[in-house]
Image (spheres, helix red, strand yellow):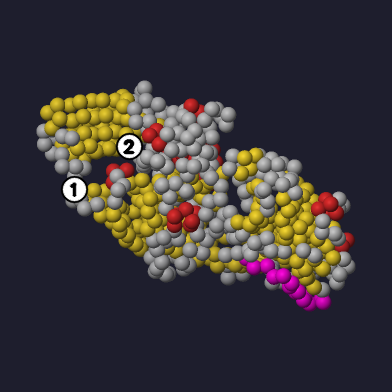
Amino acid sequence: MKKTLLTVCALTVGLGLSAQTYFSEDFSGGLGQFTATDDDGDGFNWTTVDYAAGDGQGNVATSESWSGGTILFPDNWLISSSIDLTSATGAISLDWSVIAQDQAWADEYYSVYVGTTGTIAALSGSATSFSETVGTSTGYMSRSLDVSSFAGSNIFIGIRHHNCDDWFRINIDDVVVRTLLTDDIEMTAVTTPSVAATGTNVSITGTVTNTGGNTINSFDLSWDDGSGPNTETITTTIPSGGTYNFTHGTQLNVASAIAYNLTVCATFTGDLLASNDCIAHTVSGLAFVPDRHVVIEEGTGTWCGWCPRGAVAMEDMTNDASRSKFIGIAVHNGDPMTVAAYDAGAGFSGFPGMNVNRKLLGESVSTASMQSLYDQEVVEPTNSDISVVGTYDAGGNISIDVTATFAATVNSEHRLAAVLVENGVTGGSGYEQTNYYDGGGSGALSGGGIADWTTAGDPVPAAMMVYDHVGRVLYGTYDGQTGSITLPATASSSQTQSFSGSVGSMNPANLKVVGMIINSATGEIMNANETDLLLVGIGENDFVNSFNVYPNPANSNANIAFDLTETADVNITVTNMMGQTIYVNTLSNVSGAQNINLNANNMANGMYFVNLEVNGNVVTKKLSISK
């Protein structure tokens, strides 16, 4: 939910000093107190959009330097309404937050000006200004500008996106003009993990901010789990508006599988506001260490010319045996594979984009980015294990059971959910893939079913396209099934949620089920698991008891194993993602269990389909080659 900033807020403290907010705009109602001017006249201007649903920012002001393949040379202005500082005294600060929307294309340039006349000409010549190239960051960055010299005047703020091109978007949020308390420290964040294995020691970490006008040279840092405070003095220099990332010298000993309720505080002599000194934080001891999986949901669409790199990255991750806990789901937008509720819930603003465990939102897409964020998340402790069983019967009915086994007691709302995912999706009109890599001007790209995207055409014909990881059905809504977890969920206990549906027009042999547990307060996927649909009450078909291809992924050799119900003629073919047949083996009058060796030495890395045809009935398995 969008945080609320008050238009005018006075805080009276014991010494008679006060902090007052004279202006605030969080863009929750549009541009609000700002007026946008497209000074370069290209038709692109500041607007407001929620570009990363669930990141806590809500609506932000945004301006583009690239849009839909068009390179822009922005000179876009936001100018505020008049701000009355005629009664203001002391240290006055202009504060705001900023980020580059796409971290792979982050060098947006902007300036902030303050003056007494609200025109472009006057503001651009103001001596009170701030300019920077944004660059990469781990989130929204706080910025400030001292405007104390304007006490007793009416002022205007000008925010200008300019002197850059061919990046993506700059986002501005939470613009505030306020009088600073002379001395104030705020406990801004506690970053200590919320769960930890029993028998381990956990560092108490976080960030404090100097929200006063004077420099802080030392402060007391303490934490208390109810057994008494652990306090140390930190000697450092924190300028007004500055931050300090801390690690307390005394660790928390997580001795058992209980909840350790901490109060973490920062104080110093002369601090004028005590209400922002402390943050409560809970660390839960784990009865066991859950097997952490990482769900990466990629925003994509057949209309998106850069999205082929997403398909390549998803394939690379799937074939990476060292990252076996990867679960990939392609969330389509604006094409025939779109699931409206999934598209809306994911809230992607740029395509391709990705949400990692719904914790890291709107991230840029590449194989390297997926690898890096996977590696970051797979080692994060979590509160539960997830198992999932999915079956379908001869009538095409699907049954799904998602089970959470809790490693720590959970007292806050969590929900179970499932997603049906289909591989090998093809189609006609609307399935052709726009391809900005065609011609080679954007660099080499291969994989994701296409051997060479630079020669595949733009668009790539639908007949050549096979889409994997396609999110097909949400079970329990995007946010999970309401009431699926009964609280409290105690450590070492399990709870199961059942879902049902139908196969419909989808190929059951190509379907997987992803089960997950979602923290309702944050929207984060705490853990997940993935499984193939199992056949219940029927064999692989009337003539095949079982069919398997292993090892998978394979390197130099693979085994094609099957068991027949009766003597039959068998035709085995292997096709690549382009539909080209690369292996054929015809067997006559065979019966029972068979094991055929497939020499993969001459097969390139990638995904293949192994087709077993028995008496005109075909069963298909996917085989990944990774060398």
Residue topped by disc 2: 622
Whether residue 14 is visible: yes
Q: What element carries label 2?
A: strand
For the residues labelled 2 and 1, say whether their Cβ atoms are less than 8 Å apart. Answer: no
Q: Residue at x 45, y 34 (%)?
A: 460
Residue 592 placement, left or right of 494: left
Q: Which residue is drawn at 52% across and 44% down?
A: 352
- Viewport quadrant of the C terminus: top left
Q: Where is residue 102 in the image (x, y as percent from the top left)?
A: 61, 45
Q: Position of residue 621 (x, y in %)?
A: 29, 37
What's under tag 2, amino acid-wise? Lys
Residue topped by disc 1: 538
Residue 277 placement, left or right of 311: right
Residue 472 placement, left or right of 333: left
- Viewport quadrant of the N terminus: bottom right
What's under tag 1, amino acid-wise? Ile
Q: How far apart are marks 2 and 1 (CA)?
A: 20 Å
* Span colored in magenta: 3-16
Q: Is residue 271 above or below residue 569?
A: below
State which quadrant residue 589 falls in.
top left
Q: Which residue is drawn at 58% across and 29% down?
A: 441
State which quadrant residue 240 falls in.
bottom right
For the residue carrying disc 1, how many other residues have a C-alpha within 10 Å: few (<14), some (14-19), or many (20+)? few
Q: In this view, does 411 lie above or below 246?
A: below
Q: In this view, does 511 lie above or below 518?
A: above
Mark positioned earlier in the residue sequence (2 or 1): 1
Q: Verify whether residue 310 appears in magenta.
A: no
Q: Where is residue 250 in the image (x, y as percent from the top left)?
A: 63, 58
Q: Which residue is drawn at 37% across and 25% down?
A: 603
